[in-house]
Amino acid sequence: MGLFDQILGGVLGQLQGAGGGQSGIVGALLQLIQNQPGGLQGLLARFSEAGLGQQAQSWVSTGQNLPVSPDQLTQVFGGGQLQQLAQQFGLSQEHVATGLSHVLPDVVDKLTPSGQVQDNDIAAGLEMLRGKFLG
């Protein structure tokens, strides 16, 4: 199973556990990563600045991923940004926060298979997610 299959399988499994809304949650995830100044590195820095650096680092490392709660995501991104994503994808803010809390650790983990943020892996993985979910 290749990197892309792992990412897709992980996202699909997590989204089923989060109650669906696959394309909306994936779209919100892509927006968070791609529109973040500094991309994935910038996103991880936001977690560190919010006191959640240990969680973010666990997703990049090759060890176990620490969970993140919907409330912690609201702490990192603020309700305004999550609400904007919810409106953009036709979901509730709670659904976006819950869905992202389920998929973000796994997606970051799969985008960083070597335990390091490498632009080539990230770009290819994000493009694959965009094609599979957003057409």
Image: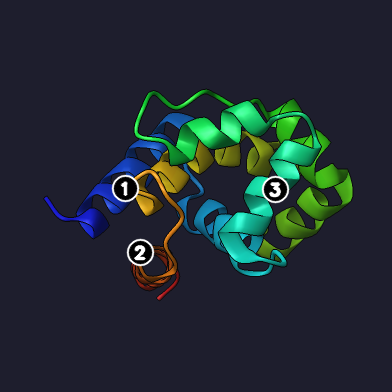
Tag of residue 34: none
Q: Amino acid at mark 1?
A: Pro
Give above or below for 16 relative to 26. Answer: above
Q: CA distance from mark 1 to mark 2?
A: 8 Å
Tag of residue 45: 3
User: Residue at label 1?
Assistant: 113
Indicate which disc, 3 or 2, sits on the residue closer to the N terminus: 3
Residue 19 in view: no
User: Residue at label 2?
Assistant: 121
- Crowd band around label 3 with a 10 angstrom C-alpha radius: few (<14), some (14–19), many (20+): some
Indicate which disc, 1 or 3, sits on the residue closer to the N terminus: 3
Most distant residue in the left direction: 1
- Crowd band around label 2 with a 10 angstrom C-alpha radius: few (<14), some (14–19), many (20+): some
Q: Amino acid at mark 3?
A: Ala
The part of the image, by quadrant, that contains residue 36 is: bottom right
Q: Are marks 1 and 2 in contact (CB under 8 Å)?
A: yes
The part of the image, by quadrant, that contains residue 52 is: top right
Indicate which disc, 1 or 2, sits on the residue closer to the N terminus: 1
Q: CA distance from mark 3 to mark 2?
A: 19 Å
